[in-house]
Amino acid sequence: MSEYCFICAKLLTESEVVTVERGMKTLINASIERADDFSEYLKNQKSVTIHENSRKNYTRKSSIAAANKRQREEQEASTSTASPPRTRSRISESAFCFKELCLFCGEKLNEESERRKSSDFRRRMSQVSTLQFKDSILETARARGDALAKAVLARVEFEYDLVAAEAKYHRDCYANFLKPSTGAKMGRPKDEATNLAMEEIFTYIENSDDCQFTLNELQKVCKTTTLDNRTIKLRLKVKYGDKLIITEKSGASTFICLVDNHHDILSKAWYKKKMNKTEE
């Protein structure tokens, strides 16, 4: 089950929820009337858990009429300013091939060609593996608000499940996307002290038998330089991409979880247990 309400894209824990099973047809019809592309997703689900208030608003006839009216007004406004109609933009972006194109730069992902290159010049690629990745992208894009952010928003906003779409990206494009939009040329960080401190953190995480860490714990790993929380989180995202899960709660510790570490720990535990049985 998804942790998010598909209607408002907020965490299910934020308000009262309801599991819809017999009312799936009503949700599908509402989606078709709204032309929001969720109907295809809903047709493949036996039930969905969503916010109660979101469900009521989503299926209410007056809300649907108001949403459609807003969409028509936006289309008319964009047409009058010689901009491409929103419907055309939406069709072209919904046709975006996430399996073959980088979701950030839009260029073709040629894995075979990259493998033939020297490791120093090879562009690394990753595939989206968590539902949280989309929410992270949307949050960053809205904060950036530049041309790149708008392009990414147009591609991602109408694709409900990037994992199911097998979305892929260049790691360097993702790293650049996470950096604040300054208009300056992106390159290697000049602060060598910060680089060295982060290498200490990377080593600590990758050599640990744990898969979960607190942000305060990682700060204390750095012996020579004090890094702020924002820098640590940003560098971790650049390094580990969608393998990283950051859980933040107001007034509580921030937890960092590395999915690969968790898998490695389970694998080691299984192997050790099997060896012990063999020896017995």
Image (cartoon, rainbow, N blue to C red):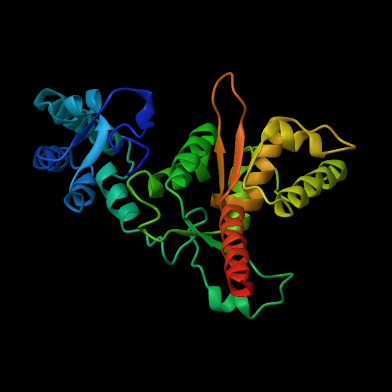
Q: Is residue 89 left or right of residue 105?
A: left
Tell me the quarter of the picture where residue 22 sits: top left
Farthest residue in the bottom direction? 116
**Percent x, y of residue 63:** 16, 25
Q: Nearer the viewer, residue 246 or 173?
A: 246
Q: Compared to 183, does 114 lie above or below?
A: below
Q: Quadrant of the N terminus?
A: top left
Q: What residue lies at 42% left-to-right and 47% top-to-bottom?
A: 131
**Percent x, y of residue 229:** 70, 31
Q: Nearer the viewer, residue 272 or 225?
A: 272
Q: Nearer the viewer, residue 259 or 154?
A: 259
Farthest residue in the front direction? 280
Q: What residue lies at 54% left-to-right and 25% top-to-bottom?
A: 249
Q: What residue lies at 64% left-to-right and 73% top-to-bottom?
A: 279
Residue 145 visible at all: yes
**Percent x, y of residue 52:** 23, 25
Farthest residue in the right direction? 224
Residue 183 visible at all: no
